[in-house]
Image (cartoon, rainbow, N blue to C red):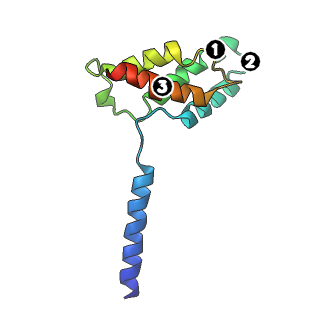
Amino acid sequence: MEAKNVKVISLMAMVMLGIFAEKSSAFSEMCYVGCLVKCGSTHRHDHKAMFQCPLSCLEKCIFQWTPTSEISTHNHNYYCKFGCAASNCIKKSSPKDPRGDKVERCVNSFCHKKCTN
């Protein structure tokens, strides 16, 4: 009887972990801010490279969970979202002031709507 309970609990735990570990295709503030802080500290003495951090991190976090097969010339949604976000969402973002919440809102709301219609 005890072994059966352990199996049931183990199965439930695996299902719950699977649900919570599922990767989202939405742009993540946590990914962007983490990347920006890391990039900024890596390039703190190279201002030209630091200037490129927001764009590099935007690209990394937009395409983060996208299967390579979906990033092709046939799937314009990802490129539209990246172009929209680069033009509209990261203007005032920097490693010193990431403004991750505003970037996330812009990418997931404004650019998502613009690129899916």
Q: CA distance from mark 1 to mark 2?
A: 11 Å
Tell me if residue 7 comes above or below residue 90 in the rendering: below
Answer with mark 2 or mark 3, whichever residue precedes in sequence: 2
For label 3, the crowd category at 10 Å Cα-Cα, with few meaning under 14, some 14 to 19 and many 20 or more, is many
SS of the residue under disc 2: loop
Image quadrant in which the N terminus is located: bottom left
Residue at 45% x, 16% y is: 84
Residue at 68% x, 21% y is: 43
Tell me if residue 13 comes above or below residue 76 in the rendering: below
| Residue that extends furthest to the right in the rendered view of this protein | 45
- Image quadrant in which you'd find residue 8: bottom left
Q: Name the one closer to the observer, 105 or 60.
A: 105
Q: Which residue is mark 2?
A: 45
The amino acid type of the residue labelled 2 equals: His
Q: Which residue is mark 1?
A: 51
Mark carried by residue 107: 3
Q: CA distance from mark 2 to mark 3?
A: 29 Å
- Image quadrant in which you'd find residue 109: top left
Q: Name the one closer to the observer, 34 or 29.
A: 29
The amino acid type of the residue labelled 3 equals: Val
For label 1, the crowd category at 10 Å Cα-Cα, with few meaning under 14, some 14 to 19 and many 20 or more, is some
Mark carried by residue 82: none
Q: Name the one closer to the observer, 56 or 107.
A: 107
Answer with mark 1 or mark 3, whichever residue precedes in sequence: 1
Image quadrant in which the C terminus is located: top left
Counting from the top left corner in percent of width and height, residue 14 is at 40, 63
For label 2, the crowd category at 10 Å Cα-Cα, with few meaning under 14, some 14 to 19 and many 20 or more, is few
Answer with mark 1 or mark 2, whichever residue precedes in sequence: 2
Q: Nearer the viewer, mark 2 or mark 3?
A: 3
Residue at 49% x, 27% y is: 60
Q: Nearer the viewer, mark 1 or mark 3?
A: 3
Counting from the top left corner in percent of width and height, residue 99 is at 64, 26
